[in-house]
Image (tube, helix red, strand yellow):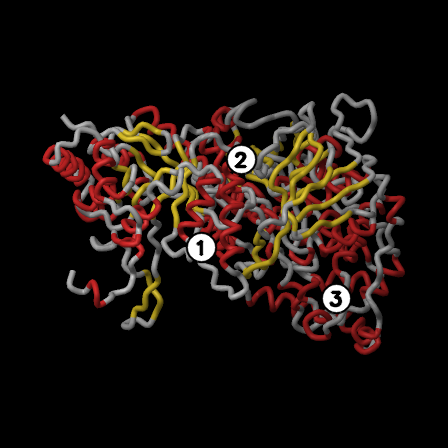
């Protein structure tokens, strides 16, 4: 830890940083108010897939960056799960060196254009900003700035590709092409390995493509990252299900020396309450995949999706927000969230809830479905809902939902999307019985090396953590790459 | 030859001996031993709503990641725990029905309506012969009065009954203000059996280590008097079958319960203390007594009991130690 602190100090003491700090007094900086992200008008954007947040202009970015006072003890970094050198990239933006800012980000983060858009900054870096902790004011918009720098680089045509070491002839396989796999692949390719990404779906990107909608994370942004990997020599194979198309043993026979499992947590979970098998009730995984990946938003596709007029989504996470906002874009007249706790306790990113509200989503908090009611054709038409009150706090500090006796009532719904969480993908554990698995179906790994119970197999991301964040998945991918490199070099 | 068959919850039991919901009825191996030793039925270890909620909270406290990064994953985790509990119990029911000659009464301990009624339906699908609902909870709130509390019980019971077709019994608390009224309301609602009574977990104080601990777990041999009293009072008053529970430690106590109007008895503590083969002692004791009294069937025994009972239940209503009776 000391060398990181020393390293940060050294960076901070660079001449350009000192100069920049002197260029403005701290009071001048703190007098500025936080930038407002330009966004598409709510009612219009609710009927299109245009990206909601338009991004900062260079002037806005520089202005916002100047709010950062370049703290001697940058607490924002402790809030970052992968310890990005936040002040350094922000100060690069302030001095107009946007490409340097992007490079700084890429020293640690494999996918800054993605993370800038989807990280829950309000719990991470921004929660630990000096402004939040000491001034009790709005933090520096670190997320917006990250996105700005990453987008600038992507659009500039001058994307820095890291130097790739000469090929060492060792083949490694990446199972799953989501953020964990992509980050792993990048680092291994840099180190000279022959990297093969094996993806079960027909598109690369995992949850970045099938899960997070276009209006939050445009596919183009993800594709640019993937293209970068392709240029570095990573090979991609789609429609390849490890465990079915070929087993790990068969891949070993083909010469693969190491495996990284990043197969994620995309197995839907249901509430298992009566009526859940009625027509018109589906999991958020299916709903979003049909739209995000299978083109169901376009009429006439072979894989359509239920286009309800009165859509109810159950849950309070990012997936629930994505689903309910997608419902609006599919033409729903009414789109409602039912969540058993209160608004403040929803796991979703604060910005997603805000955007959902602006777009006209209705929030039925402190309510929980107990039964789905169908019509004579077996299609859902109503939900029996029970009101909840908040009881004692649990470990997360949130108060537990307690049903209010006798409070049940009926609401109408013609489509229901169940978004109450996911389970880890069972395919790999099923095909490798020696792989140690936790009681939640996640893979058990060494905390330091991310090695599984099978020596040549490493894992990271949601398949290890259960559903968590993109930035953690990416951090895992990089960590596993470093470990596997050591492991393979030691053999 | 004495015929011990009896009817409880509409089920033909080979004898009146049921092993109550406990650790003894939590797994196949233990239940197999109980069946081999003659138990006619088991009430499976309860699926506890409260236990699931506690496990959920405990899991959250251990597994919630830094900055709540996996909160979405665990937000509705209690649903999964419930599913796992139901699945486990369903598998147990299935195995018992396939391999053993013993009736299976599934047990749910729930504190709220919510979606619990649907779990009862799943247990029915798994093959449970009947259901036992254990829904008592202590309300420490001064805001809740008896009417509210009782109405809630009825609401839960009716909800469950609307979703199952197998017989439903309710394990009652001994502490109702209006036990007769409650028994009657439940019976009118269609409850097939009433178990008198539940025995509760009791907190106690450890004065050496200065903490609150669990009190005595097993019942005492003298704990049977309250259920005995109420069996006698309710017998013939309500349509529902009556089963006795708490403090049945000897064949004599078992017989007293049957004589007072129980269709069946539930035993737990005595088996923990004496082993599963103690079931044989109960059955032999019952057979011996019936032979001595020249009673051939359980019906005969019930009639014998009816003749012993006073015309009115005043004797069983007596609770104070009065001088007039101190000579007894």
| Image height of A169 relative to A376, above or below | below
The numbered mark at residue B312 is none
Q: Is residue A1 left or right of residue B182?
A: right
Residue toward you, A20 or B29: B29
Residue toward you, A344 or B163: B163
Q: CA distance from mark 3 to mark 2?
A: 54 Å
Residue A329 % position (x, y) = 82, 38
Query: Helix, strand or loop at disc 1?
Result: loop
Q: CA distance from mark 1 to mark 3?
A: 47 Å
Check disc 2 and report the residue beneath it: B162
Give the residue at x 75% y 40%.
Answer: A213
| Image height of A207 relative to A23, above or below | above
Q: Is residue A9 left or right of residue A62?
A: left
Callouts 1 and 3 in the same chain: no
Residue B103 image-quadrant placement: top left
Residue toward you, A382 or A280: A382
Callouts 2 and 1 in the same chain: yes
Res. A249 in view: yes
The numbered mark at residue B137 is 1
Residue A296 % position (x, y) = 77, 29
Res. A174 in view: no
Give the residue at x 67% y 69%.
Answer: A74
Check disc 3 and report the residue beneath it: A139
- In which quadrant of the rendered image does the C terminus of chain B lie? bottom left
Residue A409 image-quadrant placement: top right
């Amino acid at each position: 830890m000391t060398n990181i602190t020393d390293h940060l100090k050294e960076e901070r003491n660079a001449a350009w940083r000192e100069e920049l700090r002197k260029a403005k007094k701290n009071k001048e900086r703190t007098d500025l108010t936080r930038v407002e992200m330009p966004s598409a008008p709510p009612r219009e954007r609710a009927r299109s897939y245009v990206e909601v947040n338009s991004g900062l202009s260079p002037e806005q970015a520089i202005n916002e960056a100047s709010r950062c006072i370049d703290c001697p003890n940058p607490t924002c970094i402790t809030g970052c799960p992968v310890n990005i050198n936040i002040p350094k990239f922000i100060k690069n933006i302030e001095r107009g060196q946007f490409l340097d800012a992007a490079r700084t980000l890429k020293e640690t983060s494999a996918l800054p254009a993605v993370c800038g858009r989807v990280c829950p900054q309000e719990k991470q870096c921004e929660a630990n900003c000096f402004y939040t902790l000491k001034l009790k004011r709005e933090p520096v918009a670190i997320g917006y700035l990250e996105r700005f720098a990453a987008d600038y680089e992507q659009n500039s045509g001058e994307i820095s590709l890291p130097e790739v070491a000469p090929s060492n002839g060792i083949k490694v396989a990446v199972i799953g092409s989501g953020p964990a796999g992509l980050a792993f692949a990048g680092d291994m390719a840099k180190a000279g390995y022959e990297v093969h990404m094996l993806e079960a779906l027909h598109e690369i990107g995992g949850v970045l493509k099938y899960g997070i909608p276009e209006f939050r994370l445009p596919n183009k942004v993800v594709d640019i990252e993937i293209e970068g990997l392709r240029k570095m020599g990573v090979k991609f194979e789609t429609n390849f299900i490890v465990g079915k198309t070929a087993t790990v043993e068969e891949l070993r026979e083909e010469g693969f020396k190491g495996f990284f499992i990043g197969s994620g947590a995309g197995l839907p979970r249901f509430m298992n309450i009566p009526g859940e098998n009625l027509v018109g009730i589906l999991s958020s995984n299916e709903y979003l995949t049909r739209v995000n990946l299978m083109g169901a938003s376009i009429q006439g596709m072979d894989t359509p999706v239920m286009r309800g007029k009165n859509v109810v989504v159950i849950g309070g996470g990012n997936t629930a927000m994505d689903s309910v906002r997608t419902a609006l874009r599919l033409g729903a007249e009414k789109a409602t969230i039912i969540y058993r706790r209160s608004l403040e306790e929803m796991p979703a990113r604060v910005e997603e809830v805000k955007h959902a509200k602006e777009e006209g989503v209705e929030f039925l908090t402190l309510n929980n479905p107990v039964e789905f009611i169908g019509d004579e054709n077996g299609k859902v038409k109503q939900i029996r809902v029970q009101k909840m009150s908040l009881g004692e706090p649990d470990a997360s500090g949130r108060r537990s939902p307690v049903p209010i006796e006798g409070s049940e009532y009926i609401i109408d719904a013609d489509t229901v999307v169940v978004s109450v969480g996911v389970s880890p993908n069972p395919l790999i554990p099923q095909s490798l019985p020696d792989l140690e698995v936790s009681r939640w179906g996640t893979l058990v790994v060494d905390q330091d090396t991310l090695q599984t119970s099978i020596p040549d197999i490493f894992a990271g991301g949601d398949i290890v953590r259960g559903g968590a964040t993109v930035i953690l998945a990416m951090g895992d991918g990089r960590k596993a790459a470093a470990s596997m490199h050591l492991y393979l070099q030691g053999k | 030859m004495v015929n011990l068959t009896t009817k409880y919850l509409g089920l033909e039991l080979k004898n009146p001996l049921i092993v109550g919901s406990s650790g003894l009825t939590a797994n196949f191996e233990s239940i197999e031993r109980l069946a081999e030793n003659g138990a006619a039925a088991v009430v499976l270890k309860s699926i506890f709503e409260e236990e699931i909620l506690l496990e959920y909270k405990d899991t959250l406290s251990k597994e919630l990641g830094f900055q709540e990064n996996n909160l979405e994953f665990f937000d509705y985790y209690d649903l999964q725990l419930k599913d796992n509990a139901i699945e486990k119990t369903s598998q147990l029911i299935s195995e018992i029905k396939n391999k053993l000659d013993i009736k299976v009464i599934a047990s749910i301990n729930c504190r709220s309506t919510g979606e619990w009624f649907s779990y009862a339906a799943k247990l029915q699908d798994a093959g449970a012969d009947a259901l036992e609902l254990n829904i008592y909870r202590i309300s420490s709130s001064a805001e809740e009065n008896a009417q509210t509390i009782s109405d809630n019980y009825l609401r839960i019971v009716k909800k469950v009954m609307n979703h199952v077709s197998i017989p439903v019994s309710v394990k009652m608390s001994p502490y109702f203000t209006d036990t007769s009224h409650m028994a009657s309301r439940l019976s009118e609602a269609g409850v097939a059996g009433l178990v008198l009574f539940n025995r509760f977990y009791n907190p106690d104080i450890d004065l050496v280590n200065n903490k609150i601990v669990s009190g005595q777990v097993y019942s005492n041999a003298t704990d049977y008097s309250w259920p005995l009293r109420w069996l006698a009072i309710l017998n013939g008053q309500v349509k529902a079958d009556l089963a006795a529970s708490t403090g049945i430690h000897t064949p004599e106590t078992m017989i007293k319960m049957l004589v007072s109007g129980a269709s069946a008895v539930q035993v737990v503590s005595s088996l923990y203390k004496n082993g599963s083969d103690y079931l044989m002692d109960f059955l032999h004791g019952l057979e011996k007594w019936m032979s001595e009294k020249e009673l051939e069937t359980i019906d005969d025994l019930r009639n014998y009991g009816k003749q012993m009972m006073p015309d009115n239940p005043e004797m069983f209503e007596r609770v104070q130690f009065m001088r007039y009776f101190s000579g007894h």
